[in-house]
Image (cartoon, rainbow, N blue to C red):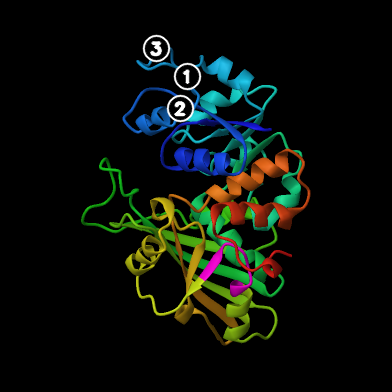
Amino acid sequence: MIKVGVVGYGTIGKRVVDASIDSGFNVAIAVRRYTPKLDIAIEKKYPLYSMTGDIGIDVCGDFDDFIKDCDAIVDCTSKNVPVENFPRYKNVKVILEGGEKHSLTNFSFSSLGNYEEGVNKAKARVVSCNTTSLVRTLSPLKNYIGNVFVTLIRRSVDPWDIKGGPINAIVPVLKVPSHHGPDLNTVLPDINIQTMAVKVPTTLAHLHIVRAKLKTEMKKEDVRDIFENTPRIKVLSGYKSTADVIEHFRDLGRKRCDMQEAVIFEESINVESGKAYWIHVVHQESIVVPENIDCIKAMFGEKDKWKAIYETDKTLGIEKKRECYK
């Protein structure tokens, strides 16, 4: 039984905790301080550890005890905090999230892109929500496409966050390319990709507009069928906005209304003049959760990529027909 330690109980951390438990792992949580969000973990009697001494609640031990008690650690703390924690992670497998630099672990993971390279790794970084969606949509097309250009329209903050984000502005990323293209290349180095990004005043999701030059003749139906038969991609017809898409997952009764798939607007899929086009939606709060579970499985020796992905998807209730997993 793998004991997974999750550092941080915020947007990603609490979801990784739940998914790890559902996947049959033993789970413990380490936090820097008490916040009301922890009341759920306390009510559920999850083992809690303190990273900073007395935090005003009962804990099982300090951060050193936590590290010693775990087989794998998933550090979901805020950006740059994992850099401080990383030197302490000795004799334990470690997963960091996409806000950290690739150079910290020298291995970036995304299930559909490079699962096999993660087998028996000791340190890994699961790429960001935006990069995860790009890996998912570009991986099944990589033999058919040449260069790719993506415009990323990014949400400003998560729905619960009252501390920041543009109120009456569109904020461009003035560095071109934005970091998303180079980040994709840490997983899929052979894809020629350029990216530009803006941040807008919405909290629901990111949206990507993709143009890919084709190396072979295809029809839009071919592109759609590839997406339809790829795990963790959902093609929706008749939806006109990110609000529509999020409402779809509310109506499905998903826990926390999570949308762990990359969702493609079917009407946006097109092929014209040797280029493929589509628009997809990225739920920043949940899309990387399946990849974290897969990464744990790979690090502990599960060599069968499609078996791991299928079992994770089935556990999370997002599986497609079995023949998609090959």
Secondary structure under badge 3? loop
Per the image, the residue denoted by label 1 is 51
Amino acid type, label 3:
Asp
Question: Which residue is at a point 44% across and 16% down the rendered structure image?
Answer: 52
Between disc 3 and disc 2, the foreground one is 2
Secondary structure under badge 2? loop
Q: Which residues are magenta?
A: 227-234
Secondary structure under badge 1? loop
Per the image, the residue denoted by label 3 is 54
Q: Where residue 45 is drawn, which disc sits there?
A: 2
Between disc 1 and disc 2, the foreground one is 2
Label 1 to label 3, Cα distance in Å?
9 Å
- Check disc 3: other Cα within 10 Å, few if <14, some if 14-19, many if 20+: few
- Check disc 2: other Cα within 10 Å, few if <14, some if 14-19, many if 20+: few
Q: Please check the rendered image and state whether residue 319 is part of the magenta-colored stretch, yes or no.
A: no
Residue 168, x across and y down, in percent: 21, 56
